Image: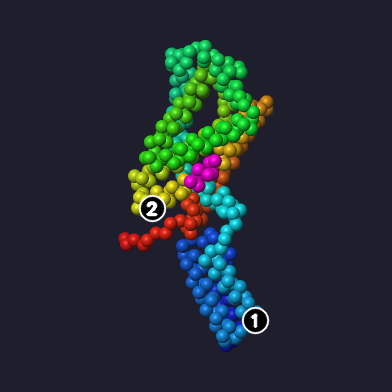
Amino acid sequence: MDVDVFVAAHSAEWNRLAALTRSARSLRGAEADELVRLYQRVATHLSVIRTEAPDPALVGRLSTLVAQARSAITGTHTPAWREVGVFFKRRLPAALYLGWRWWVSVAVVFLIVSGIIAAWIATHPDVQAAIAAPDEIREMTRPGGAYEAYYSSNPAASFATGVWTNNAWVAAGALLLGVLLGIPTVYMLWLNALNLAVGVGLMVSAGRGALFFGLLVPHGLLELTAVFVAAGIGMRLGWTVIDPRGRTRARALAEEGRSVVVVVLGLACVLAISGAIEGFVTPSGWPTWLRIGIGVLVELLFLAYVFILGRRAAKAGETGDIDSRYAEDTLPAAT
C-alpha cells in the first residue's frame, strides 16, 4: 500500500475529526453524529495502517487522534471550575434570555400597577389616612425617619447578608411556586408592587420623593429586575403545565424545571450583588448621582449579560437545561 496516497485520500477526514474532538463539549445533533462516524472510520484507518504499512509516525498520529476522539465520545471527568465557567458563560445567560418576553412583560405590568397606586396614594390624603395615622406617616417620612434610617439600621455587612438571604428566598419562591399555574407568583408580585407603591406615594406626598428614589435606585434596579426575572420564568413554568408544547407534561416540566434551578442559582448571585450595593452603597455618604450611577451601571451590565451573551448562547443551541449526559434517558416514541 502506498502510504502517501492513503494519507492524501484521508487527511481531510482526520483533520475534521481533530476539529470536532476539540469542540466536542459544544457539539449538537448532526455534528455529534459526525464525530462518532469519523471516529469509527479513523479507527479503521489505524487498523489498516498497522497491518499493511506500519509507518511509525503515521501510526502515532492516528493513535493519538483516535484516543482523543474516544475520550470525547465516552466522556471524561470535567473539572469543577470548567462546569462553573460553562454555567455562567452559556447556561445561565441562555436561560435568562429565553425567558425575556415573560419577565419583561412582568416588569411592564408591575411598574404600571405600582405607579398608578403610588400616584393614587400621593394625591389622596384619605387613602394615606387609611394606611396609617398622620403622626405615624410623619415619623416614617421625616428626615432620618423610618424610610431613611432603614438602610443604616444595622452594620453594612450584616445588613447586606440579611437582605440577600431574604431576597434570594423570595426569588426562589416566585420561581418554584410558579408551577402552581403561577398563582402564588402573581400574589407575591402584588404584595411587592403594593409595598413599593406605599413607600413612593407617602414619600412623594411628604415632598421627599427625590430622597426616596436616591435611596431606592442604586440597589433597587437590579433587585427588582431579579424579582421580575424570577416571577416571569416562574409563570412560564406554570404555563408549561397548561401547554407543554408538544412534549409529554412530565418531560416538559422536567426540562423547564431544570432550567428554573439554573435561574435560581444565578439569581442568588445577582441578588448578592444588589444586597452588597444596598448594604454598602445606598447608605453611604456618597453623592446621590454617584450612588445612582453605580446602580444604573450594574443594571446595564446585567442586561448586556442577558441580551448579548445570552442571545449568543441561545443561538448556539443552549437552552439552560443541564448537559444531556446528566439528564434522564428517554424512550423513543412513535409519532
The kind of residue on which mark 2 rests is: Arg
- Residue 299 is at least partly visible in this image: no
- Describe residue 112's horizontal placement relative to residue 157 as left or right: left
Q: For the residue labelled by badge 2, is the local secondary structure a helix, a strand or a loop?
A: helix
| Mark 2 neighbour density, 10 Å: few (under 14) some (14–19) many (20 or more) | few
Q: Report the residue marked by disc 1.
A: 56
- Describe residue 92's horizontal placement relative to residue 247 as left or right: right
Q: Is residue 266 magenta?
A: yes
| Mark 1 neighbour density, 10 Å: few (under 14) some (14–19) many (20 or more) | few
Which residue is most to the top? 135
Q: Indicate the position of residue 67 as horizontal and vertical percent values.
A: 58, 71
The kind of residue on which mark 1 rests is: Pro
Q: Are marks 2 and 1 in contact (CB under 8 Å)?
A: no
Q: Report the residue marked by disc 2.
A: 251
Q: Is residue 199 magenta?
A: no
Which residue is depicted at the point 58% across and 18% down?
A: 145
Which residue is depicted at the point 48% across and 57% down?
A: 326
Q: Quadrant of the N terminus?
A: bottom right
Q: Earlier in the sequence, mark 2 or mark 1?
A: 1
Viewer-nearest residue: 295 or 137: 137
Q: Indicate the position of residue 204 as horizontal and vertical percent values.
A: 53, 19
Which residue is most to the right? 286
SS assignment for the magenta stretch, majority: helix
Which residue is depicted at the point 34% across and 61% down?
A: 333
Q: Indicate the position of residue 41 as horizontal and vertical percent values.
A: 51, 76
- Residue 169 is at least partly visible in this image: yes
Viewer-nearest residue: 158 or 138: 158
Q: Indicate the position of residue 59 as horizontal and vertical percent values.
A: 61, 79
Separation (CA) of disc 2 from disc 1: 51 Å
Which residue is depicted at the point 43% across and 13% down?
A: 126
Q: Which residues are magenta?
A: 261-268
Q: Quadrant of the C terminus?
A: bottom left
